[in-house]
Image: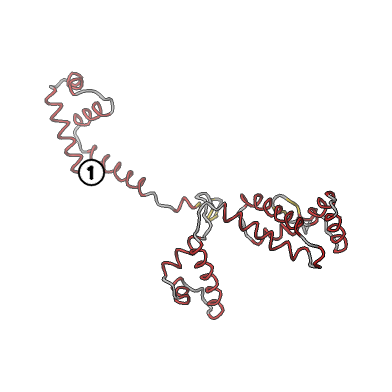
Amino acid sequence: MANKVVICGIDTSTLPKCTKEKSDELLREIKNGNSAAQDEFIMYNMRLVLSIIQRFNLKTEIADDVFQVGMIGLIKSIENFDISLGVKFSTYAVPMIIGEIRRFLRDNNAVKVSRSLRDIAYKAMQAKQELLKSSATDPTIDDIARALEIPVKDVACALDAISEPISLYDTVYTGEGDNMLVMDQIKDIETENNLIEQTVLRDALSNLGDREKQILFLRYYDGKTQTEISEEIGISQAQVSRLEKNAIAYIKNIV
């Protein structure tokens, strides 16, 4: 149990291991059309696919999909492998599996990134590693841009473009039983402005007389006409109109 590792829902400790002699034997059987030998060989090489997936540091929700793609790469490797070349199977299979996974991640990325941006980002990451060798501190975007002789904004845009999108519900902090999500740190300008307006409006209404409040309530909450209001509170329609206009003008002036 100490060696148990679960990847993509698969307990790697339960996967069989294969000797080189057994692997060579199965590959020969596969080339002779033995489908059972191919199924057995695929089972033996699931570890190889899982080890490659771990390199990509994937989010859990897409790891299973990537595993399936990696298995397709494995099957393609088996079908195209030439046993007469004397090359180790894993040497041939690893680049093919990685290529299959990279194509899947590129083609299924929600945000399409141009080749020019990807090239700049790749150069920027290489430059960062080189700068780290000669400095104890993490290089800034400015440092990387100077090293590449590229405008800072281009480097920043390129690195931002290849960053994996995060969910608003991802946890950024956990403490004392409470989780802070990404969405908790985002400022909602529209909601904030609405709250401010509501507070100011409430204060303005509180300064109106009881009759003005009553008229506005009946007019804009109950939807009554000025004539209906005049009959209900016992004043003329002209007085209702005047009081309503004065109240609205006061509110507009405050808000």
Q: Is residue 59 left or right of residue 115?
A: right
Q: Is residue 203 left or right of residue 80?
A: left
* Residue ID for mark 1: 255
148 vs 14, nearest the viewer: 148
**As shown in the figure, which amino acid type bears the numbered disc 1?**
Val
Looking at the image, which residue is at 31% across and 46% down? Answer: 196
Image quadrant where residue 206 sits: top left
Q: Is residue 192 left or right of residue 146?
A: left
Looking at the image, which residue is at 45% across and 66% down? Answer: 156
Find residue 128 and report its horizontal and vertical position in percent: 53, 73
As drawn, 216 above or below 170: above
Q: Secondary structure at mark 1?
A: loop
Name the residue at the bottom extreme. Answer: 134
Tell me the quadrant of the picture where the N terminus can be found: bottom right
35 vs 113, nearest the viewer: 35
Name the residue at the top extreme. Answer: 231
As drawn, 42 above or below 203: below
Find residue 144 and report its horizontal and vertical position in percent: 48, 73
Looking at the image, which residue is at 88% across and 63% down? Answer: 21
Find residue 59 and report its horizontal and vertical position in percent: 60, 54
Find residue 73 and report its horizontal and vertical position in percent: 70, 55
- Color theme of the render: secondary structure
Looking at the image, which residue is at 26% across and 29% down? Answer: 220
2 vs 62, nearest the viewer: 62
Tell me the quadrant of the picture where the C terminus can be found: top left
Mark 1 crowd level (few <14, some 14–19, many ≥20, 10 Å Cα): some
